[in-house]
Image (cartoon, rainbow, N blue to C red):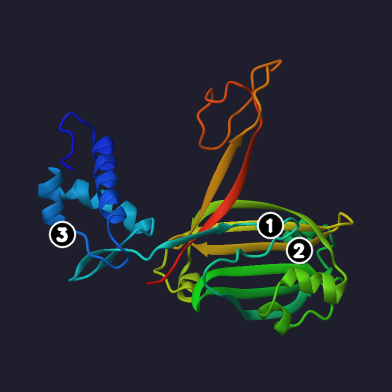
Amino acid sequence: MEIDPAASGAVLKRERVRDAILELIDARCPGDAIPSERSLCARLGVSRPTLRAAVDELVVAGLLVREHGRGMFVAAEKITQELAPERNSFTLPRAGGVWTSKVLELRTLPAGARVGRRLRVSPAARIRYVARLRLVDGSPMAIEHLHVPADLVPELTREELEQGDLYEHFRDRHGVQVGEAVQSIEPTVVTRAEADLLDVPELSPALLFERLTTGTTGRPVEYVHSLYRGDRYRIVSRLTLGPAAAPTEPPVGHQPGIPPGDLLSGGPVTFSPRAVVQRDG
């Protein structure tokens, strides 16, 4: 398990240390301790700053947990689940564990310029604004901010927002049939107020989701931005290379995470996103 002495450079050395610790994690169960920093430094033949840098990455990734005065432990296992498991379904993923919602605010107010542009309505148009906390097994996972044209769901209730599938409520109780959604994801950090709601330290890493949902008529029916805990939520994609084809011209650009030139066949690449939720121990 000793690090190859030929490996040079701080980045490569840290990566080798990270891989060695990952082997220790794979061989243990959630909640098990891993050797102390001093022991690992001696075993791997690296300095303490190098070891700590690798451990810090694994703590942020939610694979290790530090407990002051006790040491380092393997974090609780993660559950893989489809991000959008069914066609025309834009609900939060359902996996092991119970997803619930708690409404923090429900108001009718003017759309304003920014939300109005997204929903293609006047800034003065009335919308239903909802802030809700999403929980898994009672633990906070995300903060959602929903904006829906008020004329589409004038009788939207707190009970609908906290119980069942919101898009089923849209369809069955309000006659709104969703057609498709465009969603973006980017990294961010949480503010003090968000940290209090999510039970994490201020400036903790998070994932910001923005989604615009349109109905079958093409009208925007919902604009949402959500903040997910970065320590317990990540996205995994499965890439599938389509049948090889002789391109008439060199492909332009590249797929995220795949260096340019690695897909010279020119075949189409499809991907299916999955979400991974870190369970509490």
Tag 2 secondary structure: strand
Packing grade of label 3 (10 A; few <14, some 14-19, many >=20) is few
Along the line of sight, the residue nearer the viewer: 104 or 183: 183
Name the residue at 46% across, 75% down.
196
Residue holding disc 3:
36
Residue 120: x and y in percent read 83, 57
Location of residue 81 by image quarter: bottom right
Amino acid type for the residue under numbered disc 3? Ser
Residue holding disc 2:
222
Residue holding disc 1:
211
Drawn side of residue 71 relative to residue 170, left or right:
left
With respect to residue 139, does 14 lie above or below? above
- Spatial distance from mark 2 to mark 3, Cα to Cα? 50 Å
Residue 240: x and y in percent read 60, 37
In the rendered view of the protein, which quadrant contains the N terminus? top left
- How many dots with numbers? 3
Tag 1 secondary structure: strand
Name the residue at 18% across, 34% down.
4
Tag 3 secondary structure: loop
- Spatial distance from mark 1 to mark 2, Cα to Cα? 8 Å
Amino acid type for the residue under numbered disc 1? Arg
